[in-house]
Amino acid sequence: MSKYQILPALPDHDHRIVTLNQKNIGWISTDKTIGLETCGSCHRENYSLSVLRGQCAWCGWDIDEEEILKLES
């Protein structure tokens, strides 16, 4: 079982929320772009320029994009 979960999209939104251990950490868009807004390790808000890299600007933690994309299929 994955530690990640993708929540259903809200009405009029083009993305779905990604959670790690039931805490919101980012999003995945309809074109499969993944953004990391809150670090899954240090729990700090990510620096805006690092969101689309999927890596925490503060501690270097990486979101597991492959595991998330497997949940999408």
Image (tube, rainbow, N blue to C red):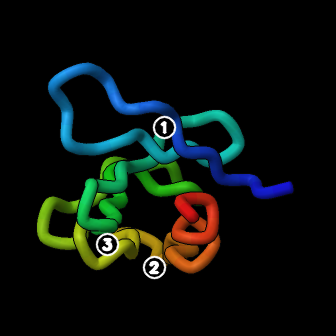
Q: Which residue is mark 3?
A: 57
Mark 3 in CB contact with mark 1 (< 8 angstroms): no
Graded by Cα atoms within 10 Å as few (under 14), some (14 to 19) or many (20 or more), the crowding at tag 2 reads: few
- How much space separates mark 2 and mark 1, taking CA atoms? 18 Å
User: Disc 3 on helix, strand or loop?
Assistant: loop
Residues 40 and 44: in front is: 40
- How much space separates mark 3 and mark 1, taking CA atoms? 17 Å
In which quadrant of the rendered view does residue 5 lie?
A: top right
Q: Nearer the viewer, mark 2 or mark 1?
A: 1
Graded by Cα atoms within 10 Å as few (under 14), some (14 to 19) or many (20 or more), the crowding at tag 3 reads: some
Residue 62 locus on image (x, y percent): 50, 76
Residue with the most extreme front position: 73
Vertical arrangement, residue 57 with respect to residue 13, above or below: below
**Mark number displayed over residue 24:** 1
Residues 49 and 34: in front is: 34
Q: Which numbered disc flags the more N-terminal residue, 3 or 1? A: 1
Write the residue at 13% across / 70% down.
Answer: 49
Q: Quadrant of the N terminus?
A: bottom right
Q: Which residue is mark 2?
A: 60
Write the residue at 52% across / 69% down.
Answer: 69
Say which amino acid is labelled 3.
Answer: Ala
Say which amino acid is labelled 2.
Answer: Gly
In which quadrant of the rendered view does residue 46 lie?
A: bottom left
User: Disc 2 on helix, strand or loop?
Assistant: loop
